[in-house]
Amino acid sequence: MSFSAQFSEEAVHARLTALAQVTDRDVLDALSRPEPKIGDFEILLSPTAARHIEAMAQKAHHLTVQRFGRTMQMFIPLYISNVCYNRCTYCGFSMDNKIDRVTLTLDKVRSEAALLHAKGFRHILILTGEAPDHVGAIYIRDAIREMRPYFDSISIEVQPLSEAEYRMLIVEGVDGLTLYQETYHHETYLAHHLSGKKRLYAKRLDALEGGARAGFHRINVGALMGLYDWRFEAIALADHLRYLMRAYWQTQYAVSFPRIQGAEGGYTAQNPVHDRDLVQLITAFRIAFPDLGITLSTREAAALRDHLVPLGITQMSAESNTAPGGYSGSDSLEQFEISDERPLVEVQKMLLAKGYEPVMKNWDASLVATVTL
Amino acid sequence: MNEPLIIAGHTFSSRLLVGTGKFASPTVMHDVIMATGSQIVTVAIRRVDLTQPQDPVLEAIPQGTLIVPNTSGARNAEEAIRIGKIAKASGLSDWIKLEITPDPNHLLPDATETLIAAKLLVAMGFKVLPYIAQDPILAKRLEELGTAAVMPLAAPIGSNAGITDDTFLRLIIANANIPVIIDAGLGAPSHVARAMELGADAVLINTSLASARHPIPFATAMRKAVEAGRMAYESGLPSRSATASASSPLTGFLQGA
């Protein structure tokens, strides 16, 4: 049974309501257990647990160092197209926005890849809008072929593809799949995804399963924080993760909590997630899922990113540009505004000063690609 | 006393192997390796850039240390063999620490795939060090295939839990004609000393070294624990008697009967 068939908003709401009953004792008990117990995650998400944020941070830090060491995986996003047939309220690429639409030529893909390689990046995340007949699996495959020589790890964040299309990309050397549900709250989902294929809530919800079956080594899930109650999203996200971890146990999972930033179209978050909430989210997920990767993007401001490093983050981007062709100079419009604009070297220095090694390469294409030796 | 460790005909005076992941910097890693006195380190091929003449991880490994590439990240035999071939083709090493861990959370070894990969890698001329669960039969099967050692885990990687039950480790050690290197989950000097007292030929540690607050003195403590445990084992550890030795025998009357 797919996740969409068993996911119940009512059940999430019931657990959300129960958070009001959580006591300080419950929180302290949850924090003192060596292994997380059923229900601990919700306890740690509760408003009561927010009063114990320092203890949560200490525990999250300890668990992260034990499981992941004093390292931080670095990656860079590369937007290869902003053509999109979806209308989404919060996104700069939304079809209604009168912006220049750019899909990089393969030559341009190669030159951007070479430029990012020269900066030192070895893990890349490729992003597109959703325009299947314009930017379909074949174009994405061709773009990957251009990038392959420059990167050790390639992940994609594109429209949901079929299992067969995912397989085709894995053979080309793609090891990671990122796909955010944006919001798990169906009504809110429909209110923000006005038209286009993305409006199909259940299709998106189940797309990761095709990716897991196809054999991605890594899958990154997430919700766009700010569309609906962040605690609802967190509980739903945790359910989704648990489902995936049981059904597709050979995949390594990571989670992201992107907060809505300013973008063309002028959307502002209706359910703002404050810094304190973000810290609670990160630490609650770390404590409940000690082996989970947690991804942090440059959407967040430099000072906050620096503080979040020891709290459970395992991978972060740097020097990102969300406009296609933006690295080698382009005036096309961004998907959203970047807050941390520091160059990679500055972020590396910050990490080293905090006692973390910035890891540029922690994957080898030969693990997935059919290479000739 | 001070018997050397011999693996695949190579002799080592240190019985402590070090993994190179999770360190705060290549410098810390270097200093930790020095403090452990280790002569064998494992390196994940996924972490190093073999196309680069001066990879920062490889550069930080002290001169004269044997580098054993590992197949970290491999979920099946095919992936592990590809990694092994790349390591060998690059000229890095013909040793391979075979880790096939289809479950990315607990990184537990897959017995079936490990056996398949070990057979092929041995046939290709690799010196194979397979990471396995505490399975005495699998250990013998691997030995028969020609692996250079077996590396049973003490506890899940990164757990720092130590040996919680030594029943199957004892059987593996008792039956082995190749070195038994206890790998994973050893988080304290007492854990490694225990492993050595049991008669393990060596131990491999990584997480505890990388996550200790002061990794270098901790590395020294681990080195001393390995040496102490080994010395105790070689000197004939007095066994804890399982039966009482009564001062007045109950069956003395049988003598001369």
Image: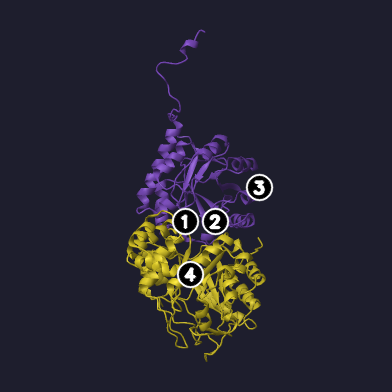
Q: Chain of mark 4?
A: A
Question: Quick one: label 2, few (<14), some, or many (20+) residues within 10 Å?
Answer: many
Same chain for marks 2 and 3? Answer: yes
- Which residue position holds label 1? B21
User: Is B106 rendered above or below residue B9?
Assistant: below
Where disc 3 sits, the SS reads: helix
Q: Nearer the viewer, residue A136 or B89?
A: A136
Say which quarter of the image contains residue A228: bottom left
Q: Please, what is the three-letter code of the amino acid marked with disc 2?
A: Ser
Q: Separation of disc 4 and disc 2 at Cα?
A: 37 Å
- Which residue position holds label 3? B119
- Which residue position holds label 2? B72
Where disc 4 sits, the SS reads: helix
- Which residue position holds label 4? A12
Chain-order first, disc 3 or disc 1 = 1
Q: Does the residue at mark 3 contact the one at mark 1 (Cβ under 8 Å)?
A: no
User: Is B176 rendered above or below residue B123?
Assistant: above
The chain coloured purple is B
Q: Does the residue at mark 2 contact the one at mark 1 (Cβ under 8 Å)?
A: yes
Question: Quick one: label 3, few (<14), some, or many (20+) residues within 10 Å?
Answer: some
User: Is B55 rendered above or below residue A223?
Assistant: above
Same chain for marks 4 and 2? Answer: no
The chain coloured yellow is A
